[in-house]
Image: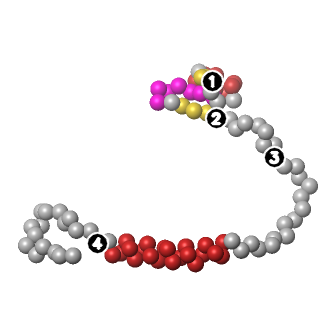
């Protein structure tokens, strides 16, 4: 890569030094190549037993949305600002 010696201080430098970027990418590649095989090995863990009931997953989560016009929606239905607390 050649540098201009007679470059004025007002001109932007258009050369990009990619060597540090390549060095970082190679180090990350080596790290991933070493750690990827280690992730497939499992460790046996004895978890304690619990008598608690699991959380119900059948209920649909509540979604509250506000669009760019300031309109408020609960799930898919439009709700006025004054009636939000009653609807929730």
- Residue that numbered label 2 is attached to: 63
User: How far apart in space, not on screen, are marks 3 and 4 (Cα)?
Assistant: 54 Å
Asked if the magenta segment contains residue 70, the reply would be: yes
- Residue that numbered label 1 is attached to: 77
The numbered disc on residue 17 is 4
Q: Where does residue 65 sit, x and y in percent of width and height?
A: 57, 33
Label 4 secondary element: loop
Residue 87 in the image: above or below residue 12? above
Q: Earlier in the sequence, mark 2 or mark 1?
A: 2
Q: Is residue 47 left or right of residue 4?
A: right
Residue 74 in the image: above or below residue 36? above
Q: Earlier in the sequence, mark 2 or mark 3?
A: 3
- Residue that numbered label 3 is attached to: 55
User: How far apart in space, not on screen, are marks 2 and 1 (Cα)?
Assistant: 10 Å
Q: Earlier in the sequence, mark 4 or mark 1?
A: 4
Asked if the magenta segment contains residue 22, the reply would be: no
Which one is closest to the eye, mark 4 or mark 1? Answer: 4
Query: Which span is picked out in magenta?
Result: 68-74
Q: Earlier in the sequence, mark 3 or mark 4?
A: 4
């Amino acid at each position: 890569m050649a540098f201009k010696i007679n470059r004025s201080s007002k001109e932007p430098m258009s050369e990009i030094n990619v060597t540090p970027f390549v060095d970082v990418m190679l180090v990350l590649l080596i790290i991933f190549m070493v750690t990827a095989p280690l992730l497939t090995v499992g460790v046996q863990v004895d978890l304690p037993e619990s008598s608690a009931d699991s959380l119900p997953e059948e209920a649909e989560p509540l979604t509250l949305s506000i669009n760019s016009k300031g309109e408020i929606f609960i799930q898919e239905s439009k709700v006025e600002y004054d009636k939000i607390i009653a609807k929730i």
